[in-house]
Image (tube, rainbow, N blue to C red):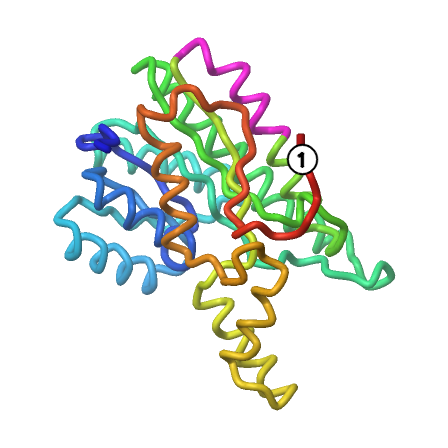
């Protein structure tokens, strides 16, 4: 299937590693020129060079803290200047696992608000900054990376930020739909990334198991009995970023490998 993405442009926040980097690579492989943003300049530059070399597409590294409005505005201006226009926004910036993990008495206002400032307000800031550019062209795609914690109890800030993103996305879909702009959420589960590799190594040292055994344990609650790779989450996102996905907006799609047994009508 031709996803009709060649010549499109995208911003990917949190694009220097993990799922964000995989999405940027997936888009570039389909002919998209990409601006990737993150706070760490060294990793960002390395990721941009790697993706550009692998795909031959223009990949622009832009340092940005989405927790700051001025940073977001400057980043979007720089991306639009470098790429000519913005067709696609991938909201992905945020600390894996969140900041306020409990127990309750250990949860601070600073941790909660810090997490929501980046992964909820940061998403809103980016959407607000790119929406006028998309409306002008009467076309756009916004995909917001959430997390399966939105669908279960657990860490305080992680679930809160991810369920808030769902509401944000649906509201954006309703408001921006008349301008040819869609907005959707993708919830990854436990995804094979460098972060998960490090976590498995730490748990292996503590338990005496091997990292491979820990990975198998992590996958046991998935219907497929395997961990989803970051590139496999990217496949879902790249489709949603394409013109082919016009029938899908305001929706929430799990890319978890079938995590859990809950039914979502």
Magenta residues span 167-179
Relative side of 11 to 112, left or right: left
Residue 257 image point, x, y percent: 52, 52
Residue 175 inside the magenta-drawn segment: yes
Give the residue at x 66% y 52%: 260
Could you tell whether 104 is left or right of 145 in the image? Answer: right
Q: Nearer the viewer, residue 7 or 125?
A: 7
Residue bearing mark 1? 264
Q: What residue is rendered at 37% in x and 48% in y?
A: 37
Taking the magenta stretch, the answer to whether it contains residue 12 is no
Q: Name the secondary structure under disc 1.
A: loop
Q: Is residue 100 placed above or below 264 in the rendered structure?
A: below
Which residue is at a point 61% across and 90% down the rendered structure image? 208
The C terminus appears in which quarter of the rendering?
top right
Residue positioned most to the top: 178
Identified at 59% across, 67% down, the residue is 218
Along the line of sight, which residue is nearer the eye, 189 or 75? Answer: 189
Q: Residue furthest bottom?
A: 208
Q: In screen coordinates, is 158 left or right of 202? A: right
Q: Is residue 113 above or below residue 227?
A: above
Q: Judge from the rendering whether residue 188 lies leftward or rightward of residue 99; answer left or right.
A: left
């Amino acid at each position: 299937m031709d996803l009709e993405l060649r010549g499109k442009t995208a911003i990917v926040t949190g694009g220097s590693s993990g799922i964000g980097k995989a999405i940027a690579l997936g888009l570039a492989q389909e002919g998209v020129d990409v601006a990737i943003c993150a706070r760490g300049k060294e990793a960002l530059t390395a990721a941009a060079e790697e993706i550009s070399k692998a795909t031959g597409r223009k990949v622009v590294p832009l340092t940005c803290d989405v927790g700051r409005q001025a940073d977001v505005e400057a980043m979007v201006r720089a991306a639009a200047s470098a790429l000519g226009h913005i067709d696609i926004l991938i909201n992905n910036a945020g600390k894996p696992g969140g900041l306020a993990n409990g127990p309750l008495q250990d949860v601070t206002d600073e941790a909660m608000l810090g997490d929501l400032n980046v992964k909820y307000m940061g998403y809103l800031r980016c959407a607000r900054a790119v929406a006028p550019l998309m409306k002008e062209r009467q076309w756009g795609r916004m995909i917001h990376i959430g997390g399966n914690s939105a669908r279960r109890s657990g860490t305080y800030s992680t679930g809160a930020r991810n369920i808030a993103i769902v509401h944000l996305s649906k509201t954006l879909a309703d408001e921006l739909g008349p301008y040819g702009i869609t907005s959707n959420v993708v919830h990854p589960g436990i995804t094979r990334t460098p972060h998960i590799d490090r976590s498995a190594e730490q748990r292996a040292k503590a338990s005496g198991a091997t990292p491979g055994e820990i990975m198998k344990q992590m996958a046991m609650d998935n219907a497929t009995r395997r961990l989803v790779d970051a590139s496999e989450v990217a496949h879902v996102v790249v489709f949603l970023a394409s013109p082919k996905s016009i029938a899908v907006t305001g929706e929430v799609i799990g890319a978890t490998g079938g995590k859990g047994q809950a039914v979502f009508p």
